[in-house]
Image (tube, helix red, strand yellow):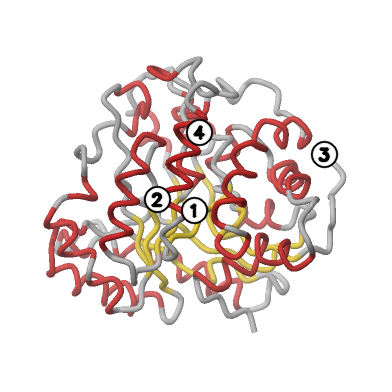
Amino acid sequence: MEQILEPDLAIIDPHHHLWDRPTEILKNLPPSDHGFMDIIRDIPRYLLDELLADLKSGHNVIGTVYMECGAMYRADGPEALRCVGETEFVNGIAAMTASGLYGNLRACAGIVGHVDFRMGAAVEDVLRSHIAAGHGRFRGIRQSCSWDADPGVLGPLAGRVPQGLYADAKFREGFKVLHALGLSFDAWLLEPQIPELTDLARAFPETTIVIDHVGTPLGIAAYAGKREERFGIWRDHIRALAKCPNVHVKLGGLPMPFAGWRKRMAEPLPTSETLAAQWKPYIDTCIEAFGPSRGMFESNFPVDRFGADYVALWNAFKRLAAGCSPEEKTALFSGTAKKVYRINLG
């Protein structure tokens, strides 16, 4: 394990997941050589014990924000409300660390859940149920629009949503309820889709929006060998999106299979020096475009374990932020997350 860089630097990890996939579920998974299947099969369980092992591995993580991933939905009851089970589950995890039993760390101090905005205005009842279930910790919604014409890009995640989701009239009817309830929106999409988020952000300038994983650059399937070629396109899209003052960016997600740096989890893990060199063009571009006050480093664990361990990942971020002032580092590692997700650790 690497030596921890800047061990006293406070971190609020604004993006991680929790899940449990019993053996019988894994047995029914279809065969696939997509790297995302490695994550599903090799990390069947990531609950409080596994999370704490990462959070306490050396970096000064003082709090986290949970990001929806379809975990622990209710098995019965109204279909529209089943997603509230995830918030109920995560709030229990948050309550465990809020007890102080595990030290000063406050995991899941903010919770971002899921809803299908295509319900239109009727989504308000589901959102209010999430808020109630979060007992003061619920902060917003993520609904991905990730889509590509080549199903090999998303692999097992392909086909979950239709093309052009964020432009759908019913989606936008539901989306406008967010601001009225004081909630934010996280967007996961693929690099060619960034203009779709820019259009949404312009249509709803009062809603706080976060683009996850620097917009997910691509280097696999139809984009294999084209990541560097497409960098300029990605950069132009990011700069246009950053002109929307209501949008923030999560700096991470690059260890996932989509960028194509690592093909299988069985390959040796890279060092933080290697990771920082790979990610530098993307991270530097985002910080320049959005500024530290609208950027936040994220772990995206355990998904990003595909390409980095927790220690090396945060060491890489610290290497990339080496030229920043103390105030800028505070923003990137904790301040922006604290502001956007209204995290109170006191």
x then y, percent, for residue 51? 61, 54
Rendered image: mark on residue 18:
1
Image: 111 above or below 196:
below
Crowding around mark 3 (Cα neighbors within 10 Å: few <14, some 14 to 19, many 20+) is few
Alpha carbon separation for disc pair 4 and 2: 13 Å
Please, what is the three-letter code of the amino acid marked with disc 2? Answer: Cys
- Tell me the quarter of the image containing the N terminus: top right
Residue identifier under label 2: 69
* Circle 1: residue type: Leu
Location of mark 4 (residue): 39
Q: Residue at x 19, y 74 (%)?
A: 125
Q: Earlier in the sequence, mark 3 or mark 1?
A: 3
Residue 36 point in image, percent of width and height: 45, 30
Q: Secondary structure at mark 1?
A: loop
Callout 2 touching callout 1 (CB < 8 Å): yes
Residue type at tag 4: Ile
Report which residue position mark 3 lands on: 1
Whichever of labels 4 and 3 marks the residue nearer the N terminus, that label is: 3
Q: CA distance from mark 4 to mark 1?
A: 13 Å
